[in-house]
Amino acid sequence: MSEIAIGIDLGTSNSCVAVRAGESAKVLPNTYGENTTASVVFFQESGAIAVGNAARANIIHDPVRTVSSAKRLIGRFYRSAEVKKARAICAYEIVEGEGQNVEVQIGEERFSLPEISAMVLREMKSIAEAQIDEPVTKAVITVPAYFNDNQRQATKDAGRIAGLEVLRILNEPTAAALAYGFGRGLNQRVAVWDLGGGTFDISVLEIGGDVFEVLATCGDTFLGGDDFDDRLIDLLADEFLKRHKISLRNDPYALEKLKVAAEGAKRALSVDSEVEIRIPDVITGPDGQTHSIERTLTSSEYAKLVSDLLQRTFTVCDSALSQAGMVARDLDGVILVGGPTRLPLIREAVASYFQQEPKADVDPDEVVAMGAAIHAASLLNPESEAYLLDVTPLSLRVGVAGGLAETIIERNTPVPIEQTRRFTTFQDYQDSVDIRVYQGESREAREGELLGQFTFSGFERARRGEVDIDITFEINADGIVKVKAQDRATGQQAETRISLSAGLSENKLEQIIDDSRADRISSDNNEPGESARDLNAIVPAPEHRERRAVVEPMIPAPEAAAAGDNAVAPAPGEQMTFDDEPDTDEIEIPLDTTPFDDELVPEPDDGELDAFDGGLPELEPNRPALQPAADQQDSDPDHIGLKDVLFEESGGDLSSTDTEVES
Amino acid sequence: MADLASNEVVALAGILGDLDYYQLLHLEPDARTSDIKRAFHASSRTFHPDGNRHRDVDVRKAIDQISKRITEAYSVLRNPRRRDAYDRHLAEGGSGVRMDLAEADAIASRQQTEARHGRTPLGRQYSSLAAENLAKGQFAAAVRNLQTALTFEPDSAFFKEQLEEARKKLDAEES
């Protein structure tokens, strides 16, 4: 009913919510009058859940029940480097859930990452509802521009669990540029330098009145303000070890105290040139004696600690500028985003790199939420007031023979976009192919992020190279990927249409929504019980199911898939298994159990020097893109989720494919 | 921006397969890069899915197809190497009016390779002989071979460059 849509900046450390107000947006403060709320969830022994700045206060007292920086983990595979790093640093327990997803173990309970982020989103929603005094059901949620498909999809799932219809997943730097340029009729080229708690993004945009065109975006999802804190934690812990021969790293309580002190010191250095770090009773030694830390830290000492991290961001900036076909002096402005950019040493380094002072009239903590709110309102308005032309941050690839991944859509290509590529079979009488989709810049498939895979079958068996399979890749305006495969010979009949993503299966997602564990949030923004009522009332109709893979109509039956399992020796652990009987009467079950080779080869006319006479793929006008029937099937809960069929029995093989791509 | 009438949108989606990228963006074949950008922005104001969320499902589907083709057209035309590959494709009357981005890149990279090694068999032959000469320090022979290569491909910038270099080295040797 409500026609209010909010913008939420779901940050690694802090979140912010805003709503459109006139030509701009206003940030909605929490009940304590604070414009940002800690992205921290505290699980009390009693079962009650607290979110926000009050929860953050518990980190020191109960670190194993307090979850922070969940954004570093969302949409990642358990065995990825980033998760390993988080496990070393976080006091709360990070465990492997189904499908190689990450889960958090709190006492006897386990929570998926989208569920944790949903609790933060619920809090932001409650803050907005308390301020606006109306229920809120629609939102634009921002993500780092460099987030991959899995991370975007998991964030979208989190929104749904929180009872929000996610109108758009919007890139943080794009949101910042929108807040900066909206309604001002600017003609400018700007860079957005965005250092969040856990990620770094740089986007180069051209603003032409109401059009905001992203020319290039680059990032580093391994680099954020947390890393700056880690440097100081390392320093303090090392000094302590040297002096007292006691390791603070093995004590979660001591470690949390160090973290809080490090973050506090960083904030203090945003104002002063020197800070006094005092941590009384940081640890009790084996002899029963308590020890404290007292130390002065100067701004220049801190600058030394983090200078290589800053240099890393400028390497990423070099790449973004070069992809935008620009040099620093071509820019009309530089916008700083993220709390750490309040540090004078960062502002100075950025000013020196770009050879100009960053814009001073932009609040680095609030600008992203404001841009999200402006876009949210604009999406509800039939007369759109701003057009965001964004790009895909990572190259989209498909796995081919030889462990390689071919580029289909290069990074920094504008979205939405669709590309079709023709492939053929690798072996005589091959009757199915495994199609694997990756994101990343390496040609080596194992170095990319596997977004998903599916088996395509049902085409006529023929000699190698005689079967033409068109694979169509689509990236929508959310940056979310969809893939479909079609056999040229049998055409529409054998079309497989799927969408990809690891993450939660549809069943699991619904179960989470039903469980509504988020109802245990004791929010200061609402009367107890009210939030529970809201949740049940406004779970949006399940129309957003892109992440859920639906393979139709030619789904191999369980028997056929099992045969494939035994057969595909070259790629152990990457086959599909089915744990549901597909519920559709259009399915033709291939009874043939001949072993198949799962590899695809590109058509020979592809990329070779003298092979271009093969010509373009023949395309029919009006290619089918979004068919109503397919849409309906997408939301049929009985279809098989890709995640269900992908990773459950995939053994150890994924560990080599889930390495995060660094720029 | 006022909406384009629904029937016009659906009709446009229906003829997408007949429109080349210039026609789609309302551009002349000799459009400059700045024109291409302006056209992309203008088309996006009409066809961006965000500005058409409120419309009927059929129209939204048509918009979806059109907007994806517009970003594709822009991605090809704004990149001079891809645009060159696309222009040749159109000139040769190849199949279809669209070109996959990866294919445009592959053609562009082939053209670059050709520019370096020669387009004609004899041009390639003499330039590769000249390359061997240069590697072995036989600068007089390199000059001769490159001069011959240029008779087959008089406009090859790469051959001219190589010839210049060979001559310099020859001069340095003689002095």
Image (spheres, coloured by chain):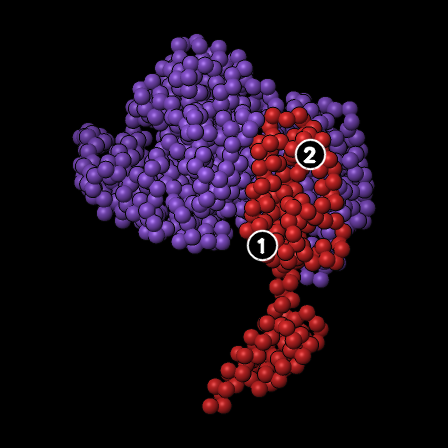
Chain colours: A purple, B red
Please report the residue visible at 71 percent of the width from the left and 45 percent of the height from the top.
B19
Please report the residue visible at 60 percent of the width from the left and 75 percent of the height from the top.
B159
Q: Is residue A535 above or below residue B48?
A: above
Which chain letter goes with mark 2? B
Whether residue A78 appears in this view of the structure is no
Please report the residue visible at 49 percent of the width from the left and 26 percent of the height from the top.
A377
Q: How many marks?
A: 2
Residue on which disc 2 sits:
B9
Which chain letter goes with mark 1? B
Name the one closer to the observer, B163 or A635.
Answer: B163
Label 2 – label 1 distance at C-alpha: 27 Å
Question: Which quadrant of the figure has residue B51?
Answer: top right
Name the one closer to the observer, A80 or B35.
Answer: B35
Which circle's residue, 2 or 1, is located before the other in the chain?
Answer: 2
- Mark 1, Cα crowd under 10 Å, few <14 / some 14-19 / many 20+, is few
Q: Position of residue A562 (x, y in %)?
A: 71, 33
Q: Position of residue B85 (x, y in %)?
A: 66, 57
* Left/right of residue A261 with respect to residue A199 in the rendered view: left
Q: Is residue B98 above or below residue A385?
A: below
Name the one closer to the observer, A52 or A116.
Answer: A52
Quarter of the image that includes the N terminus of chain B: top right
Q: Position of residue B43 (x, y in %)?
A: 60, 40
Q: Position of residue A68 (x, y in %)?
A: 38, 29
The circle drawn on residue B32 is 1
Does mark 1 fall on the same chain as mark 2?
yes
Task: Kindly check if marks 2 and 1 are in contact, taking CB atoms under 8 A apart as contact.
Answer: no
* Left/right of residue A416 with respect to residue B122 in the rendered view: left
